[in-house]
Image: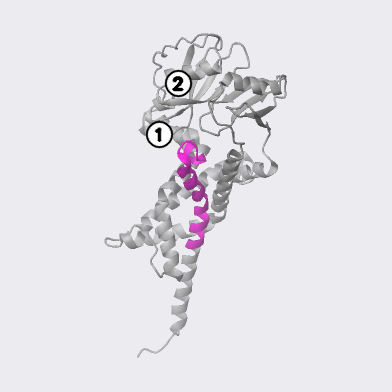
Amino acid sequence: MTWSSFRRGLQTVHLWAGIALALPLIVIGISGSVLLVQREVAVASVPAAPATGDKQTLVRIIETARATQPDRRVARVQVPRAEGEAVAVRMQTRERPIRNNDVYVDPVSLQILETRDIVQRTDFARQLVNLHAFLLMQPSTGMPIVGWMGVAMTLMGISGLILWWPKKGFWRRAIWVRKGAKGLSLNLDLHHAVGFWSMIVFLIMSISGVYLVFPETFHASVSAVLPTGVAADGPVPETPVLPGPFDADKAVLSAEAVVSNARARVVQMPDRPERPVVVEMENTGFGPSAPPILVTMDQNTGEVGYIDDPRQYAIGDKLLNAQHALHFGVGFGWIWKVLVFFSGVLPLFLAVTGVNIWWLKRRARQRVLTAVPVGAPAE
């Protein structure tokens, strides 16, 4: 088989696979982008803390929130970092069914800014998740189909890269839209240029989606070529001795003392005497800030019991852990969130330009055929 015949065959497969799978891929992509926007709108709607000055201790913030609902227990408290950031104190009922709400407190003035119930998704949000993850089918049926759609997207991206690969001297033309291009030329340039510049994000989102559907298969494949497994636990760093009873403020100080290049973001308060306090931390050095670093401490003595630091995982597990954060646009900054959003629009854009290319080429061929009468005498 010659390269030209292979390329023609690959082009045919790429075209008709794209047409056949366009609708479900567009639905999965657009719904993912909408879910991302929905999440960011919810985050942005958190009330701002207007007061300026020194922040109060977590203990005082917790006492302020508890005073509004003395019949509930404090489940967790957010550690204030940025100026103007309200502190969310999660209040939880003591009886079942468990109900939660967040009390937003100004960390400087201790003003109660708002109280929000933690409720299940609305019908619209639930259907949006079902559409993205299951294509509105039963999970047992829809999830594998969506996973295989991710495989198809990966193969479409790779085949598109092969078909796009320019000849020597044509690279500049292959990655930009030519000035004055229109019709078939415009659609070709758009399809090629956007496909090239978005290729890395497109493949990351496709592959991470496959991982979320088939984690065990993915883990086995990664384990075959990269080291995985948590390294043997080293000695737990000595817990700093802090005077007075152990509380949320001391939990933050202890966690930040025993884990380097990290800062506390959330303190989870135990609901039983035998359970530990858990501090969630984020990486402040180079690398993603998700998943969180976890530090457990005895709620009575403050002694550190266990440190789960994803930065210490084997390279294979680091790669696998990153898939969730990459796919959901967390832990890699706002630029990655923007790229994730636009990746959801890519299937629609590439499908429209791809179909236009096919249709315009087909129409041009028909025009040529009709211009030459069948059986016309040779001159």
Q: Is residue 343 left or right of residue 138?
A: left
Task: Please tell me how crowded label 2 is: few (under 14), some (14-19), or many (20+) other residues with Cα within 10 Å.
Answer: some
Residue type indicated by callout 2:
Glu
| Residue 264 picture location, percent across and down | 49, 25
The answer to whether residue 309 is magenta is: no
CB contact under 8 Å: marks 2 and 1: no
**Colour convention of the picture:** one colour
Marker disc for residue 287: 1
Q: Residue at x 53, y 18 (%)?
A: 249
Look at the picture and state if 258 lies above or below 40.
above
Residue type indicated by callout 1:
Gly
Marker disc for residue 256: 2
72 or 66: nearer the eye?
66
Which stretch is magenta?
Answer: 325-353
Does residue 133 show up?
A: no
The residue tagged with tag 2: helix, strand or loop? helix
Residue occupying the far left of the picture = 168
| Residue 121 picture location, percent across and down | 67, 38
Q: Residue at x 40, y 59 (%)?
A: 192
User: Which tag is nearer the camera, tag 2 or tag 1?
Assistant: 2
Q: Residue at x 60, y 20 (%)?
A: 60
Look at the picture and state if 378 lies above or below 313.
below
The residue tagged with tag 1: helix, strand or loop? loop
Does residue 220 show up?
A: yes
